[in-house]
Image: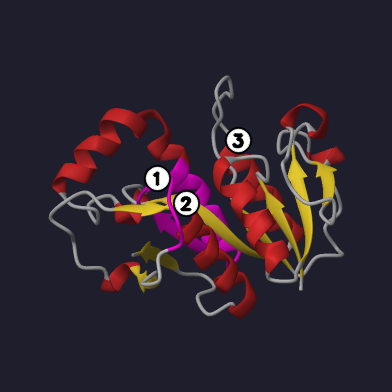
Amino acid sequence: MRMAVLGASGRVGRLLVDQALERGHQVVALVRDPERAGVPVSRRADVRQADVFSPRTFPDLADVEVVVSAIGVGKGDGPGALVAGARLLAAANIRTVWLGALGSGPSQRAGGLIYQVVMRMFVGAELAEKAEADQVALGAGATVFHAPDLKDGPLSPGRRLVRLADLRRPLLPPRMSRASVAALMLEEAEKGDHGGEIVVPLD
């Protein structure tokens, strides 16, 4: 399968690229600045410059079957990057797996009370934009991952997806390794079981 990874220089994006190559996929790594990003990926990846704020120069993705987005808001970024990215992918009419955050929009209370408070404290300014970007992605038929707090660590053998509507609210704030989330996103990219749905990755 030929897939594109948006945000390929980020902490989840790098894992997506490496794991996709390990699975035997052809990968198009989309990064804002290939020269400065230092994407540590295999040379088998096709690295393309892709700035979501420059739709006219955004690369044509007609040669890919699915886009897996791990785009985030980096230091120095102004507001709007998430919504701009979601709109670009929606307009491209390509099947998309989109990384969002548990605790935003429809999953505002799904992570439990403690998690909700933590999200407001540390992500509060971005929550509205995350929710808006998710709605754009969902409207275009994307699978939207509402991932919990992410940490470094190995793949979890018990990793799984749960539809948001079926999630049981946890007592303690949930956490999950970036590697496990990346693996689940790639599995969804391969199978396409949850298009137009919000799913929650869990250990």
Q: Return the x and y of residue 152 as percentages of the image width and height.
A: 43, 45
Q: Is residue 17 magenta?
A: no
Seen from the viewer's position, the closer of residues 158 and 3 is: 158
Do labels 2 and 1 touch, CB within 8 Å? yes
The residue identified by callout 1 is 151
Residue 94 visible in rendering: no
Q: Quadrant of the N terminus?
A: bottom right
Circle 2 crowding by C-alpha within 10 Å: few under 14, some 14–19, many from 20 = many
Circle on res. 178: 2
Q: In this rendered view, identify the residue nearer to me: 58 or 135.
A: 58
On screen, residue 98 versus residue 202, left or right, reads right
What segment carries the magenta color? 130-155
SS for dot 1:
strand
The secondary element bearing badge 2 is classed as helix
Q: Nearer the viewer, mark 2 or mark 3?
A: 2
User: What kind of residue is marked 2?
Assistant: Arg
Q: Measured from the top left, where is residue 134 in percent x and y?
A: 49, 53
Is 72 placed left or right of 200 in the picture? right
